[in-house]
Image: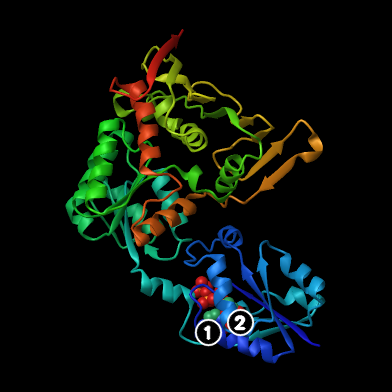
Amino acid sequence: MKKVITYGTFDLLHQGHVNILKRAKEQGDYLIVGVTSENYDEQRGKLNVMQSLFERIENVKKTGLADQIVVEEYMGQKIQDIQKYGVDKFVIGSDWLGKFDYLNEYCEVIYLDRTVGISSTDLRNSKNNILRLGVVGNGRIAKRFVKEARFVSGLEIEYVFGRNENRLSEFCKDYSLVGYDTDYDVFLEKVDAVYIALPHTLHYVFAKEALLKGKHVLCEKPITLSLDEAKELYTIAKENNLIIQEAIKTVYAPCFARLLSMVKSGVIGKIKDVEATFTKLINDKTLREYDLLSGGGSLTELGSYPLCLITKVLGTSPKKVIYTDFKDKETGVDLMNKTTLIYSNAIATSTVGIGVKKEGNCIISGTEGYIYIPAPWWKTEYFEVRFENQSKNKKVYVEFTDDGLRYEIADFLKAVNTKKETYKLTFDESLFISSVIDAYKNNGEFSFEKEYICLE
Ligand code: CTP
C-alpha cells in the first residue's frame, strides 16, 4: 500500500483545497492529511485564520478524501510523521516549490500545480473588507507597529497623522505609505480605524474624536490617565457599535494565553501571590517620562504590564490598593513604584521603575506550586511550572516573534470584523487598570480602599 501525506491550514475550504486533496490521493492508496493547529499557525505568523481547528478538520473530513487526519503542531513534525506513518510520498502545492526538498531523504516529494485564482486569503479578504488602519503619531512605537502590521493579512496602513511634516514625509518614505495628514478630520475620512501612538495625555482627545467619527480605535497604554475619561471612551464605543482596545501587547501573546489557561486550570492550586516587575532606566530628565504634566513617571509608563497580568490572574475587585513610591525631587515623578493589591484571598505586587533597576521577572504562587516567568516576562515566551517535587516540573515555550505587536493587531482586526470585544483584555479589565493608575495620579472615587506611602 502506497501512503501519501499532505499538509495545509484548509481555512474556509475551497476548490483549490479539494483539487489538491484529490490529486494527492491519486498518487497512492491511502491519504493522510495534516491540518495545522491554531498554535502552530500563530507561531509561523499565519494570524488571521478564521475557522477553528475543529471546523477545518470537519471540512477536510467532509471531502471524503482523507483516510486519516493528523494535527500539525510544530516545526519539524513532518519528518516525524513521515517516519511514524511509513509515508511513501509527500505532496504539496506548487507555491511551496523547493521548500520541502529536504524531505527527499525520507520519501518522494511531489509539488503539484496550484489551482489558479483561489486562496483562503482571498476568501477571508472578500468576507471582511480590508480594514484601512491609520496611524496616529510617528514615534518609535508607531514605526514598529507599521512593520509588524505587514504580517497581518486583512488590513492595510496607508496614512499617518502627525504635526511635523518633515518627519511625516520621512515616515511615509521609510515605510512606503501613501501619504500623511496634519489635519485630523481629513485624516479620519481616509481610514476605518486608528492606532493611537501619541503621548499619554493626548490619547483621550484623539480617541474620542475618532470614535465620534465612527472609527474603531486601538490605543496605546495607558488608554487614558483618568478613569472617567476611559469610561467615556468605552461608552461612546459601545453606543456606536465600535471597538476600542488597549494595546498592552503582553495579553495578546500566544504564550501568555498558555500561561493563563494553566493558571486558571488549577495546575498550581489556588493562587495566593503574584509578583511582577518591569523596570526601564531612563536617565535623561528632559524626556516626557520625567514630565509630570505629560503623565510621566514609573506607574503610568510601565504599570500597565504588571497590572494587566495581575488583573487577568486575580480579577478586578481588590479590597485595598497600597501605593509605595519614591519620587524624583526635581521633577516630582515616581522613580520607583510598588503597587500592592490586596484581594480577599490573595496578594499581588506590581513593581515598576524608571530610576531603579531590578530583575524583570514574574512569579505566580499557588497552594500546590508556582510559575516562574523569566525577564522579560512581558514578552511572554517561556515559563516554568515548579513544584515541591521537582520531578513534576514543566517548561513551556511558545514563540514571541520579533516585536510581538502582530498579535495585538490580529486580535484587534478580529474584534472589528466580528464586532465583539476581545476576551484577551475586556473593557472592564482595561477600566480597572485605568482605575488603579488614576487612584494613584488623581483622587477619584474608587471601588477599593486606597493607601499611599511615600519613601525618601
Ligand atoms: N492549494 C492549491 N491551490 C490553491 C490554494 C491552495 O493547490 N488555489 C494547496 C496549497 O498549495 C497546499 C494546500 O492547498 O498544498 C493547503 O493550502 P492552504 O495554505 O491551507 O491554502 P491557501 O488557500 O493557500 O491559504 P492561504 O491563502 O491562507 O495561504
Looking at the image, is mark 1 or mark 2 nearer the viewer?
Answer: 1
Q: Is residue 139 above or below residue 126?
A: above
Residue sitting at x 35%, y 29%: 435
**Residues at circles 1 and 2 in contact by the CB criterion of under 8 Å:** yes
Q: Which residue is mark 2?
A: 93
Q: Nearer the viewer, residue 356 or 112?
A: 112
Q: Amino acid at mark 1?
A: Gly
Q: Amino acid at mark 2?
A: Gly
Q: Is mark 1 within 8 Å of ligand 1?
A: yes
Furthest residue toward top: 456
Image position of 33 (left or right of 302): right
Mark drawn on residue 358: none
Q: Which residue is mark 1?
A: 16
Image position of 279 (left or right of 209): right
Q: Nearer the viewer, residue 90 or 433?
A: 433
**Residue 52 placement (x, y as % from top left):** 52, 65
**Residue 365 placement (x, y as % from top left):** 63, 29
Q: Is mark 2 within 8 Å of ligand 1?
A: yes
Say which label, 1 or 2, has the lower sequence index. 1
**Residue 445 placement (x, y as % from top left):** 28, 23
Residue sitting at x 53%, y 84%: 16
Q: CA gap, disc 1 to disc 2?
A: 9 Å
Q: Nearer the viewer, residue 134 or 373?
A: 373
Q: Residues within 10 Å of mark 1 (few under 14, many from 20)?
A: some
Image position of 325 (left or right of 99): left
SS at mark 1? helix
Q: Quadrant of residue 187?
A: bottom left
